[in-house]
Amino acid sequence: GGEWAAALRLLDGMSERSVMSIKAYTAAMDVCVQGGAWAEALRLLARAESLEEPPTTITYSVAISACEKGAAWIEALDLLAGMHRRKLKADKIIYTAAISACAKGGQWAAATDVLNAMGDV
């Protein structure tokens, strides 16, 4: 369980040396999600938004998986919309995680909307 805290310390050490990258943030986010610290993963995404290098599809996939773990359906839908604004293509895994976040939050209409938006991905 403490791996995510160690990942955050490592990330903070990297930021002091100005060697931050979206890959480092994405990796730290993934460790947070795996360790059950889904809200921390979303905070990392917010910090990563200030990097010159924009978040990638993989970054959004990890963030939406974090939302799924926390039943944070509103955040999942916001992230999905953010992907579309950035012209990033969501895959089945991303859509499924967003649908699951909606379902875990009891938002069946929203889950159906995401399923319909998914189309033939």
Image (cartoon, helix red, strand yellow):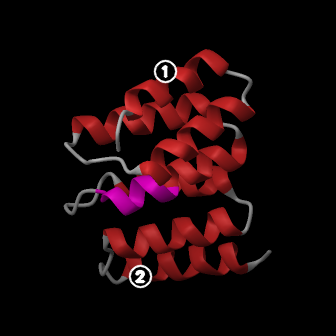
Residue sitting at 31 percent across and 42 percent down?
Answer: 83
- Specify whether residue 35 is painted magenta: no
Q: Would you say 103 lies left or right of 112 here?
A: right
Frontmost residue, 72 versus 7:
72
Examine the image and state in which quarter residue 33 appears. bottom right
Check contact, mark 1 vs mark 2: CB within 8 A: no
Q: Looking at this rendering, what residue extends furthest in the front direction?
A: 120
How far apart marks 1 and 2 lie (CA) works out to: 40 Å
Q: Amino acid at mark 1?
A: Asp
Q: Is residue 72 above or below residue 11?
A: above
Residue 14: which numbered mark, if any? 2
Task: Read off the magenta span.
Answer: 55-62
* Residue 69, position as x, y percentages in the image: 70, 49
Q: Would you say 69 lies left or right of 64 here?
A: right
Q: Looking at this rendering, what residue extends furthest in the right direction?
A: 1
* Residue 40, position as x, y percentages in the image: 62, 56
Q: Secondary structure at mark 1?
A: helix
* Residue 111, position as x, y percentages in the image: 58, 26
| Quadrant location, the N terminus | bottom right
Frontmost residue, 60 versus 3:
60
Which residue does the numbered mark 1 point to in the structure image? 113
Q: Amino acid at mark 2?
A: Met
